[in-house]
Amino acid sequence: MSHPVQAAEFLQDAAKSKWHDETLWFIRDKRDKISHTIPEWEELRELASKIKDNVLGNLDIYLEDFERNATKNGIKVHWAKDAEEHNAIVLSILQEKNCMAIVKSKSILTEECHLNSYLEKSGIEVVDTDLGERIVQFLNQPPSHIVLPAIHLKKGEISDLFHEKLHTEKGNDDPTYLTQAARIHLREKFLGAKVAITGVNFGVAETGEFVVCTNEGNADMGVHLAEVHIACMGIEKIIPKREHLSVFMRLLARSATGQSITNYTSHFRSPAPGREMHIILVDNGRTAQLGRETFRSSLKCIRCGACMNTCPIYRRSGGFSYESTVPGPIGSILSPGLDLKKYSTLPFASTLCGSCTDVCPVKINIHEQLYAWRQEITKAQGTSPKSLSMKLGNGIFKSPLAYKISGTLMRAALKTLPDSLIYNPLNAYGKSRDLPELPKESFKDWYKKNRG
Amino acid sequence: MKANSPHIALFIPCYVDQFFPNVGVATLELLEKLGCRVSYPQGQTCCGQPMANAGFERVTVGSTRHFIETFQEYDYVVAPSGSCVLHVKEHTPAIPELEKEQAELHHKVFELTEFITDILKVERIDGSYPHRVGFHASCHGQRGLRLASSSELNEEPFSKARKLLENLVGLEWVELSRTDECCGFGGTFAVTEEALSIQMGKDRLEDHLVHGAEILTAGDMSCIMHLQGIASRNKQTLQFKHIAEILNEAIS
């Protein structure tokens, strides 16, 4: 499958795709409004970007600082070079504790590592406790958005799902009623879990603490009830000092949902007496990306999802069309680093409009990296411009539009232009769009006649 | 016009040359009305943008070299296209032995409206254009060349196009719901992601239509070509004009 195919499929349900677009636009609009209430907003973005530049330039040092300080605090620090090692570490902790049921708050990293299916193979029940994540888990789907995992579903669909899974009243789609049902269901899972897993938004090198942000308080509920807390953290989530949180915390929720701050911003520093706290520092392709000069700044991402909400492609094609754990513009520059072939259509799923770059709270030049990935992909595929044109279909290279597309062959195309307009079959461009009428003379001809 | 006044080269994008000669004529006449000494170098071809955006910047060495050679002798190069100007400035490969000329050129290539406001320092254009006009902010001009404030950024609102249009007598500026959303053209994107491209175009048209636009204008004919193509297919009654056409008509 490829992005264009998936996108076309999503667009077939016109009413739903329009709703999806409008819903995410509403969030983008909220983000605009709240960011405009902060006079120093652009300065904050600049600061955040610079702090992250410093982190990426000294990642090894900060990670070792973090390990040392976290260990001093009584946290057990583990290192995982890839998803497999990460999953094996989690499993070994669970086995040591004889734990067969866990609760997990939102962690895109564990999605990236496919932790749920790995643990389920060993008979462990994994319950995602974020409401949106629980909904998609019921459906055996991955999240379609990193902040709003079930944004592709309408409340009627959730009502039907809860009726089936939680025996709510059929047809009752009142959000409060459905949320209450989920709370009751999750409460029981929270009480039964010996181990709770969370993600990490920020790891602070100087103090060895980490910060988890949620709106539902589900991370805290899980962690406070469990004997063991396992936090899974991508190595790029490190920040040097606690004071830097004053920059990131002001940007994160505003960029994500237009809120001033997440409802819960929890700092974890040491385990409570008699309990355990583990943190797994995961590479899984991040150092490889760090080594790619052009693309390294993609690792600055704080996973706010603003680029998804603003992206005119994402809003109309849905998260699943990307077929990658992190969808949208940021996913389209991260994923090719993991598997160039599999994700080769993603950097082309963009008009390079640049909205993602302007909305990004850490100023990642996302659209420029999309452009740069395109250059890498065509090199890796060994495609020639001509073979690409063949893919574009139906002799477009010789059609008038080739003019816009072919570039170097322009002069040759010029000579054949009127004929090709008449004799070439309409290509994909003309399926739902009329071609412009061909004028009787080109500008060049006019100029020669009138000013030459 | 003095013979020693700056010599301006008209850079007419290839598809404008072929499909929209009126836009070339309007650009030329407009600059002349504003007192410029303008020539159209007839050897110009395509800037190479379509290839580069498709992932083949490396094969645009020839077209880039040709571009530099064609335009290097002029004081300014002006194009009725933000997109092609952005390409020339940011996405052309470095040409060996022409590095100096290339670097200089990047500082003298301008999109039409920015040339009028920033170089000619025109504060207002006097003329009449009694129509309801919706302005489509083409992305490469909008966020690439910063021809207007970006809705994503916390900055003082400005728009070079609006500055030129808003003083025209009778012109009503149509406020849109989404002031700078992409129309979905995107070059090869229009073909490779056809379904999305069309939907994005329809949505943009809708925004202009529900707000009562009579004429949709923009700084890039590629967006207009795409939007006009969809409107024409769906029998939507909206007129389309490049901003150069409006300004040129309004002054005369």
Image: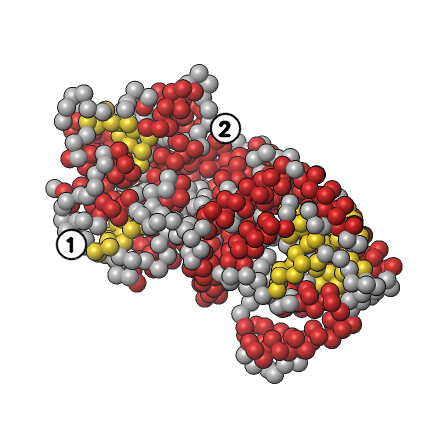
Determine whether, in the image, residue A315 is placed left or right of residue A211.
Answer: left
- Chain of residue at mark 1: B
Q: Nearer the viewer, residue B128 or A313?
A: B128
| Residue at screen point 46% across, 18% down | B96
Residue placed under numbered mark 2 in the picture:
B58
Determine whether, in the image, residue A451 is placed left or right of residue A304.
Answer: left
Identify the amino acid type marked 1.
Answer: Gly
- Chain of residue at mark 2: B
Foreground disc of the pair 2, 1:
1
Determine whether, in the image, residue A385 is placed left or right of residue A134.
Answer: left
Can you tell which quarter of the image residue A106 is in? bottom right
Residue placed under numbered mark 1 in the picture:
B170
Q: Residue furthest bottom?
A: A169
Q: CA distance from mark 2 to mark 1?
A: 48 Å
Identify the amino acid type marked 2.
Answer: Arg
For the question of whether residue B22 can be seen, the reply is: no
Q: Secondary structure at mark 1?
A: loop
| Residue at screen point 43% across, 20% down | B99
